[in-house]
Image (tube, rainbow, N blue to C red):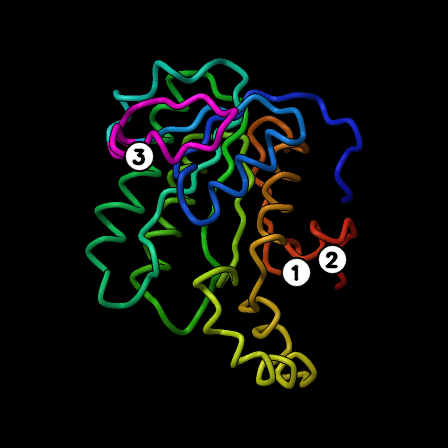
Amino acid sequence: MGREENPVPREVFVTGGTGYIGRRLVQALLERGHRVRVLARSESVERVPHGAEPVVGDALVAETFASALRIGDTLVHLVGTPYPSPAKAAEFERVDLASVRSSVAATVRSGVAHFVYVSVAQPAPVMRAYLRARAAGERAIAEAGLAATVLRPWYVIGPAHRWPLALLPLYWVAERLPWTRAGARRLGFVTLPQMVAALVRAVEAPPASGETRIVDVPGIRAAARGTTPAG
C-alpha cells in the first residue's frame, strides 16, 4: 500500500480544503504534483493554500460549484462540523449531511471519476447523531453508484486536537485483551499525518468503477506506513 514514487498527476477538487485536515491535504497533493481546486466561501478564499485554484461557492448548494467539476476529476469531501459533540446534532444534519449530498449531486452531473469521503468509525457506542449523519452520507454515495473511497477515522489527533492523548494507556490495554481488541482497533485514534497520507493514497489509487472501498482505522495507519493492515 505504499505511495507511488512518481504518481500520475490527477485533477483533484477538494471541499473543506481550508480546514483542519483540508489545508494539510491540499499542500501534500500539490507537493506530489497533483492539480488541486479548492471550494471556498468568498470570505475564506485567502485561506486556500498557495498553488491551489480557489473556486468560490457554497458546499451546501451543488449549483454553486458543479460547473467547476470536470469529467475524470477526483472529489475529496471534507466538509463537516468542527469539534463534533452531542450538542451539535442539528449541525450534523444541516452541514455534514447536506454538504455530502450536494457533493454527490454535483459529482453525478459532472462525471467525476472518484469520490473520496471522510466518514467516521462505526459502529460506535457514542455520538449517535454524528454517526447517523455520516452513515447517511455513505448511503448517498452508494445509491449514486459512484466509485468511492470511504475513510472511517474515529478521532484525528493534531494541533488543537490532542485531548485524546490522555486515553492512550486505556487503548493500549484494550487492544491487548481479546474481548476488547476489535472495538479498540476500530475506534482507535489516528494522527493528522496518518490521515493525510491515507487520503493521498486514496487519491492516487482509486477503486474500480462503481466500487466502494472502505478504509478503517487500521487501514489508515497502514497507508501511512506503506503496509497492508494486519488481520
Which is more toward the observer, 120 or 158?
158
Q: Earlier in the sequence, mark 3 or mark 1?
A: 3
In the rendered view of the protein, which quadrant contains the C terminus?
Answer: bottom right
- Discs 3/1, front: 3
Q: Quadrant location of residue 137?
A: top left
Residue 36 place in picture, x, y as percent: 52, 25
Residue type (three-letter) at the residue carrying disc 2: Pro
**Count of numbered badges drawn on the protein:** 3
Q: Please state if 224 lies on the left or on the right of 216 as rendered.
A: right
Q: Quadrant location of residue 65?
A: top left
In the rendered view of the protein, which quadrant contains the N terminus?
Answer: top right
The residue indicated by pointer 2 is: 229
Task: Give yes or no for residue 58 being in the magenta stretch.
Answer: yes
**Distance between the Cα atoms at labels 3 and 1?**
34 Å
- How many residues crowd mark 1 within 10 Å: few (<14), some (14–19), many (20+)? many
- Discs 2/3, front: 3
**The residue stretch that appears in magenta:** 41-60
Q: Quadrant location of residue 6?
A: top right
**Distance between the Cα atoms at labels 1 and 2?**
6 Å
The residue indicated by pointer 3 is: 44
Q: Please state if 191 lies on the left or on the right of 89 as rendered.
A: right
Q: Earlier in the sequence, mark 1 or mark 2?
A: 1
Residue 151 place in picture, x, y as percent: 54, 49
* Label 2 element class: loop
Q: Residue at x 28, y 25 (%)?
A: 57
**Distance between the Cα atoms at labels 2 and 3?**
37 Å
Q: Residue at x 24, y 29 (%)?
A: 61
The residue indicated by pointer 1 is: 218
